[in-house]
Amino acid sequence: FDAASSPRRTLAGRTVLVTAGPTQEPIDPVRYLGNRSSGKMGFALAAEAARRGARTLLVAGPVTLPTPAGVERQDVRTALEMEAAVHLHAPGADLIVMAAAVADFRPAAYADEKIKRHQGTPEIALIANPDILASLPQFAPRALRVGFAAESTLAATEAARKLAAKGAHLLVANDISRGDIGFGAEQNEVTIFSPTAPPETLSRRPKAAIASALFDRFEAALADFLVLRE
Ligand code: CTP
């Protein structure tokens, strides 16, 4: 019996929605604005939710990762596509984990033809993308909502401000300025912020182990939350 591969199915009967990876915001048919998110942390979280028996929906930006066992995956490219997929699935979710690095801005205009060098140096105007996490209190008022923050340092007061601004219940912060954790790395170190408890740091370990430790916290928060909600 391998306890690591056969955890207790503590999320049986629950639906968990996870977003992962970057978004790509097209400029022309060959160019886009993107970011360095690898999707590894979000995929590890989806794998962990499925291992715990949840119906697990994964909305993935453009990444080259295999779908974890037992996970239902929908691939998207842009923030607007991610928003539509999340809004489709959010109303049925008990827990939503927004691990994706959603682009905050997209090019205001898309050029149907490749922009040519001889046309001169283009000026690319940007417009704001919708904040998907901040829209969730409206689309999924009954779900426990978890945000992620990519910050080199995050003061507890700033975390509290973000939680309130986005209507989220938990915020998981990691330091993307470090090479050994965060974007693209195999390991992560995170701090969990909640309005009701002091910040808790999960020391550096493989992303699968971070995912497992995070789900222990999510399950505890979900248990409290379900009591309040029902
Ligand atoms: N998020 C989102 N929609 C966006 C931008 C971000 O849903 N358009 C979500 C991310 O999935 C993540 C959290 O919001 O859960 C990150 O929030 P944000 O504070 O925007 O990201 P940072 O880049 O960490 O912060 P900053 O405001 O300083 O840019």
Image (cartoon, rainbow, N blue to C red):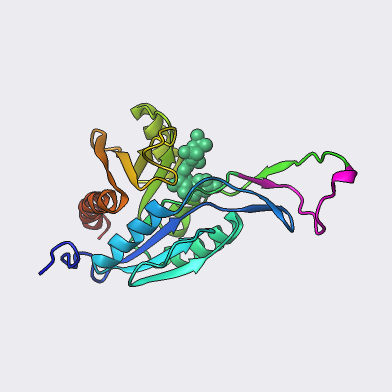
Task: Give the image location of residue 155, x and y in percent.
Answer: 37, 27
Q: Is residue 225 visible?
A: yes
Residue in view at x 39 percent, y 35 percent: 175
Task: Give the image location of residue 163, x and y in percent.
Answer: 39, 39
173 in relation to 223, above or below: above
74 in relation to 215, above or below: below
Residue in view at x 58 percent, y 54 percent: 79
Task: Give the image location of residue 210, x and y in percent.
Answer: 27, 48
- Residue 85 covered by magenta stretch: no
**Is residue 19 shown left or right of residue 170?**
right
**Labels in figure, total:** 0
Task: Give the image location of residue 179, x and y in percent.
Answer: 41, 36
In the depicted view, which residue is nearer to us: 155 or 1? Answer: 1
Residue in view at x 44 percent, y 62 percent: 65
In the depicted view, which residue is nearer to us: 116 or 42? Answer: 116
Residue in view at x 33 percent, y 72 percent: 70
Q: Main secondary structure of the magenta part?
A: loop
Name the image quarter holding residue 67. bottom left
Q: Is residue 134 visible?
A: no
**Is residue 70 shown left or right of residue 28?**
left
Name the image quarter holding residue 30. bottom right
197 in relation to 211, above or below: above
Q: Quadrant of the N terminus?
A: bottom left
- Residue 118 covered by magenta stretch: yes
Magenta-tinted stretch: 105-119
Q: Residue furthest left?
A: 1
**Is residue 64 shown left or right of residue 57?**
right
In the depicted view, which residue is nearer to us: 2 or 226? Answer: 2
Q: Quadrant of the C terminus?
A: bottom left
